[in-house]
Image (cartoon, rainbow, N blue to C red):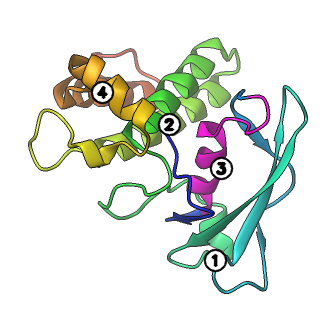
Amino acid sequence: MICRDPIVRLHSVAEAFFFLMATACESCGHAPLKPNGQLTRTADKQAPWQIESLCSSCSHRRKHTFTIQPDPTRASAQSDVVNATMEPSRAVDLLGWLTLFQTVLRAAQCESDRPSARQLVREAGLCLDEALKFYPDAAELPEMDAFFSEASRRHFRENPDWYRQSIWRDRREVMVDMEHGRKPGSRRW
């Protein structure tokens, strides 16, 4: 579900935090990892950014190193834009983004505070937007390079209907209503 390179290439600070959410602990296998501190600049030109994660199950700590293009500014670091390009993520694969979408959407449904729930719905929509970038043009199914691990490829081979682009595009349409606090299918006019 995630890139296993020692230095992960990202599009934004927001993508770094979604990467942690999609990453399982290397010690106990539980996910998600939580940030333990802030994303910080390093002196290493090959890996200029790092963040430490903490496993909520076993308390294992690990440093993750990244490149972020374009270089983040103070304003972009506070933005929730994950990837302003149409290029698919190189950090989280299609299964990872779809799993994040479902996880964040479930959290939104359990949230009792309406503004917080609406923000979570927005974040779920951002995850689904990233997933949809893995579909070439009008293809109904993704290509195998949308999956970064054998486990993800196996999930795709065993469940191809789950990956139909039309299903996820329809869900994204519903998300637009939810992001604006409307019941799916309803309009203000």
Count how many numbered circles sit on residues in the image. 4
Q: Which marked residue is nearer to the observer: mark 3 or mark 1?
A: 3
**Residue 155, how many percent across, how many down?**
36, 24
Label 4 Cα crowd, 10 Å radius (few <14 / some 14-19 / many 20+) = many
Label 3: which residue? 17
Q: Amino acid at mark 2?
A: Arg
- Going from the N terminus, do you reach mark 3 or mark 1 first? 3
Q: Name the secondary structure under disc 3.
A: helix
Q: Which marked residue is nearer to the observer: mark 3 or mark 2?
A: 3
Q: Amino acid at mark 3?
A: Phe
Image: 62 above or below 71: above
**Residue 98, how many percent across, how many down?**
42, 31
Q: Amino acid at mark 4?
A: Phe
Q: CA distance from mark 1 to mark 2?
A: 22 Å
Label 2: which residue? 122
Range of magenta residues: 13-28
- Going from the N terminus, do you reach mark 1 or mark 4 first? 1
- Going from the N terminus, do you reach mark 4 or mark 2 first? 2
Label 1: which residue? 73
Label 4: which residue? 156
- Going from the N terminus, do you reach mark 3 or mark 4 first? 3
- Name the residue rendered at 55%, 64% in the picture: 12
- Name the residue rendered at 67%, 87% in the picture: 45
**Residue 140, how many percent across, how many down?**
12, 33
Q: Which marked residue is nearer to the observer: mark 3 or mark 4?
A: 4
Q: Quadrant of residue 54?
A: top right
